[in-house]
Image (cartoon, rainbow, N blue to C red):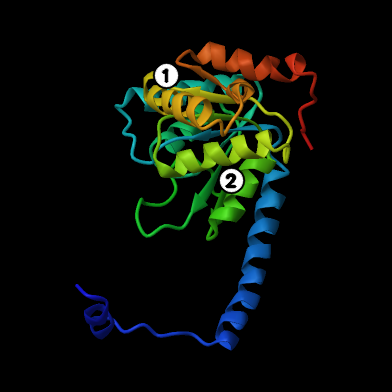
Amino acid sequence: MSLEDFKKKRPFKQRNWTQVNASNSWSMFRIMSEFVDAYDKMDKIGPCISIFGSARTKPENPYYKLATHVAERLSEEGYGVITGGGPGIMEAGNLGAQNKEGKSVGLNIELPFEQGHNKYIDHDKLISHHYFFVRKVVFVKYAQGFVYLPGGFGTFDELFEVMTLVQTKKIDRVPIVLMGKSFWAGLLDWIRTEVLNNQHNINEQDFDLFIVTDDVEEAITYINTFYTEHDLAPNFS
């Protein structure tokens, strides 16, 4: 289809500058309300670990079971669990916390696909978002560590945002755990070969920002000992 044919079939209606400015001004109130609601609820949860992964992972998938086990162990260690509130790996994280009577919260996002929040989140622990960037701020602000299981673009987005914030010292060092060695292997090989060795766009030390493991206990030990080993204090405020 040519551009002219597209315009005839679906004419584009250009908003004028006044309309754009008015829309932007009103959206600020919704943005502020999302921050206030999220901060108010999250302040009551305490130290948390954010768990990321695909919304499409089914309960019979080994990674669903792995996410459930990780969340159970985190709850036993006294951490709250933050997930995106949806199905798949997110559901597994909230399920694991519930299994051990731990605290968990779901930062749900309004999407035209992938159904709403999972059933393992109490109503008062569900925080709905319209804006991705507000949700991402809350994920980072209240997390003492991050666990990434296999996922799609959203999981990659969250991972590289946190890595960038740490690399550029916009946030303090935090434990970052990638779970599922076979899943992450190809991506990490490409980063080392192309991004590091061929293009020199990162440093060798950047690989020290995270660990990769299939072992739940290794992940838990790494998170528990991280702050001592790096001479840092976790931010529980």
**Res 66 quadrant in image:** top left
**Res 4 quadrant in image:** bottom left
The C terminus, quarter of image: top right
Q: Could you tell me how many numbered marks the image carries?
A: 2
- In this rendering, position of residue 171 left or right of residue 121: right
Give the numbered dot on residue 181. Answer: 1
The residue drawn where x is 19% and y is 72% is 1
The residue drawn where x is 38% and y is 37% is 88
Instruction: Say which residue label 2 marks.
Output: 125
Of badges 1 and 2, nearer the viewer stands 1
Marked residue nearer the N-terminal end (1 or 2): 2
Instruction: Assess disc 1: are there few (<14), some (14-19) or many (≥20) residues with their C-alpha within 10 Å of its C-alpha.
Output: some
Judged from the image, the secondary structure of the residue bearing numbered disc 1 is helix
**Res 29 quadrant in image:** bottom right
Task: Please state the horizontal and vertical placement of residue 150, each as a whole percent of the image.
Answer: 40, 30
Task: Please state the horizontal and vertical placement of residue 112, each as a whole percent of the image.
Answer: 37, 60
Q: Is residue 162 above or below residue 8?
A: above
The residue drawn where x is 42% and y is 21% is 180
150 and 103: which is toward the camera? 150
Q: Is residue 224 above or below residue 129?
A: above
The residue drawn where x is 38% and y is 25% is 186
